[in-house]
Image: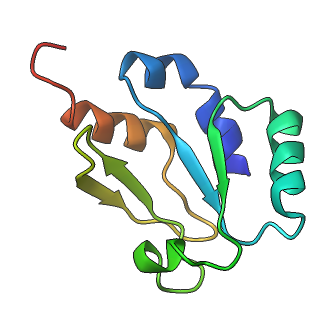
Amino acid sequence: MQQLVELQKHTETFQRLNAELVFVFREESLGVNGLKKIKAKHSTTYTLALDNQKNTSASYSPKAMTFDNYVINSDGVVVKIISGSLRKRADADVLIDALRIVQPADK
């Protein structure tokens, strides 16, 4: 949750970079209601998704306790993977730098 809170502080920067942040939760025991509580508690504007059965997230996060971040361009191509773990996740500066790489040259 700490990463969600930190990234929320940089919402304007992410908007200027035309970035959409999506968080996929795989262990939310309260399901969709849990995501609603998280969204309300942290006043997040980001998309929160749920994959408790790991049907989809297993393909891009196959190891237990993997908390990687993916930068995907507007064509749907993964252009950067930022490794993460339970204790160490990508901070806003790292994500913002990665997003700048995929910006069109005229920005």
Q: Please state which of residues 63 and 95 is positioned toward the viewer in this rendering.
A: 63
Quadrant in which the C terminus is drawn: top left
Q: On the image, which quarter does residue 69 sit in?
A: bottom left
Number of numbered callouts drawn: 0
The answer to whether residue 11 is left or right of residue 104 is right
Give residue 52's position: percent from left, percent from top: 71, 73
Task: Please tell me which residue is depicted at 47% across the width and 76% down the height of the picture.
Answer: 61
Asked if 44 appears above or below 60 in the picture, the reply is above
Asked if 38 appears above or below 80 in the picture, the reply is above
Give residue 58's position: percent from left, percent from top: 50, 80
Task: Please tell me which residue is depicted at 72% across the width and 32% down the height of the picture.
Answer: 44
Asked if 69 appears above or below 48 in the picture, the reply is below
Q: Please state which of residues 43 and 48 is positioned toward the viewer in this rendering.
A: 48
Task: Please tell me which residue is depicted at 55% across the width and 25% down the height of the picture.
Answer: 10
Task: Please tell me which residue is depicted at 55% across the width and 71% down the height of the picture.
Answer: 85
The answer to whether residue 86 is left or right of residue 84 is right
Give residue 93's position: percent from left, percent from top: 43, 36
Q: Please state which of residues 31 and 72 is positioned toward the viewer in this rendering.
A: 31
Q: Residue furthest bottom?
A: 63
Q: On the image, which quarter does residue 18 sit in?
A: top left
Give residue 5's position: percent from left, percent from top: 71, 38
